[in-house]
Image (tube, rainbow, N blue to C red):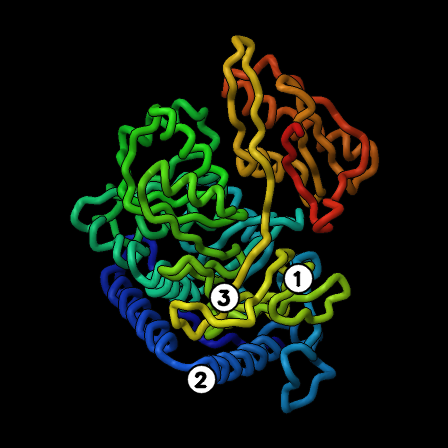
Amino acid sequence: MRPAPAVLPPLPLEQEAGWESQIGVACARWAGAVTDAYLAAMGTREAIGARAQQRLESLVSFARTHSPYYGELYQDIEDPWPALSRLPMVTRRALMARFDDWVTDPEIKRSSVERFVADIGKVGHAFLGRYAVWKSSGTTGEPGLFIHDANALALYDALDSVRLGSGILGPAAALGTILMGARYAMVAATGGHYAGVASIERLRLLAPALSESLRVFSLFEPLPQLVDALNDWQPSFVATHPSVANVLAAEQHAGRLRIRPAAFWLGGEDLSAIQRENIRRAFECTVLEQYGASECLSIACECARGALHLNTDWVMLEPVDRQFRPVPPGVMSHTVLLTNLANRVQPIIRYDLGDSVLIEAEPCVCGSPFPVLRVEGRADEVIRLQRADGQSVDLLPVALTTLIEECVESRPFQIAQTSTHALTLRIAGTRDGDRAALWDRAYLAVRAYLDAQDLSNVSIQRDARPVAVSAQSGKLQRVMARP
């Protein structure tokens, strides 16, 4: 018989009976996580490693006991537990196929989670009254549903609060100014239970007093309307993707966008040195990068000296090559295996995340005991098309990929520009009949998006060729601009 899970704390999101007392508990939980994150940063690498190892052993034991999937996976492993590298790795496809056995709370069923995320009105609300649910396809193309308990959410918030920008113009510092009237803007994909938007909606539900100072702007909006909305809002802080921020920087340089944020918080894509400098100069503000995923929202945070630091007290990353053999520090990996030490409801242990990373051998000049991380994640390109009147329009890659992801299920795809008035779309991994049906759905979604941008003159052609990976990185580039 499956054992009952350990009692996981509730996630207060709706103002129901006992809501005020639950908010107090949530604040205390966050404060405890902040204290833990702060104290860890004062220690040595050896001390941090010892804390992480204790947490790993506890997580593995919990997962083996309460997750039937991990119980089977680890059934031949005897105590004492071997090193992390000796445990079997897992993939999103394998975990999603065994979703009901993967989770540690038997009340959670994939069917009920899918019904929950199908309701857009529930974005930011608590599933079963105690969990956050986020959906993602990520760089693998395989759709994922990720559930996080209250302790994990408090920990993610605490890590970003303490370590992003070393606290200077990071979320904790921003919170004080927002309480005094400053405004926060997130420019992101809307219309789904995506991690960033759902996190903001969760905060708005948790703290109604802040709700008027927090706003999400849809990146599906035509750029002129988005620019006008940001001009009206005049945000003090902006969170978005690097490609979006770079397009907004061009609008700022051109004088159409006129905002003066204190900081841009960026994540979800590669941030090049050229992009960083372009954004910094356009807005004359601090630019901070955060690395996270739907599987673990805070993996690494940028310090005040501009380096990403891996949160090794709560996150384990194993850079590996194409054969899943470890690569040494200073070498870029083919992919990376993630272990999230914070989340108990849906354990992530040696999970193929899909990103290429490099862990530096040398410490950062900032003095942090956490290693420096370099990430080569998504590198999709901004597509520039022309309207019938000759005016250029930039299409954000994250908008295109999000639209198509919702239509093609788990199939890899590529959308490419062939001229200033034409796009092609490839969808892989299906029989011809199935692929045609998926292509039709994707076509209608992209067609509606183009029409909203006044690009009804742009054609979308079906490309029957296989999707192609980059010869250099071996990764799938899903949005390709015209050379």
Between marks 2 and 3, how big is the CA–CA gap?
A: 17 Å
Q: Residue at x 59, y 44 (%)?
A: 379
Residue 474: where, in percent of width, then height? 73, 50
Q: Position of residue 79 (x, y in %)?
A: 65, 90
Neighbour tally class for label 3: few under 14, some 14-19, many 20 plus, Cα within 10 Å: many
Q: Quadrant of residue 455?
A: top right
Q: Is residue 351 visible?
A: no
Question: Which residue is depicted at the point 54% across and 59% down?
Answer: 374
Residue 447 vs 434, above or below: the answer is above
Kind of element beneath mark 3 = strand
Residue type (three-letter) at the residue carrying disc 1? Ser
- Determine which residue is flagged by label 3: 372
Is residue 328 shown to the viewer in this render?
Answer: yes
433 to the left or right of 343: right
Q: Residue at left 49%, top 62%?
A: 299
The residue that disc 2 covers is: 47
Q: Which mark is residue 333?
A: 1
Label 1 crowd (10 A; few <14 / some 14-19 / many >=20):
many
Kindly give the residue lying farthest to the right in the view shown. Answer: 432
| Secondary element at image label 2 | helix
Label 1 SS: loop
Query: How many marks are shown on the rendered structure?
Result: 3
Q: Who is closer to the viewer here, 251 or 91?
A: 251
1 or 3: tag closer to the N-terminus: 1
Which image quadrant is residue 214 in? top left
Q: Residue at x 56, y 10 (%)?
A: 388
Q: Earlier in the sequence, mark 2 or mark 1?
A: 2
Q: Picture coordinates of residue 61 (x, y %)?
A: 57, 81
Q: Nearer the viewer, residue 247 or 51?
A: 247
Q: Amino acid at mark 2?
A: Ala
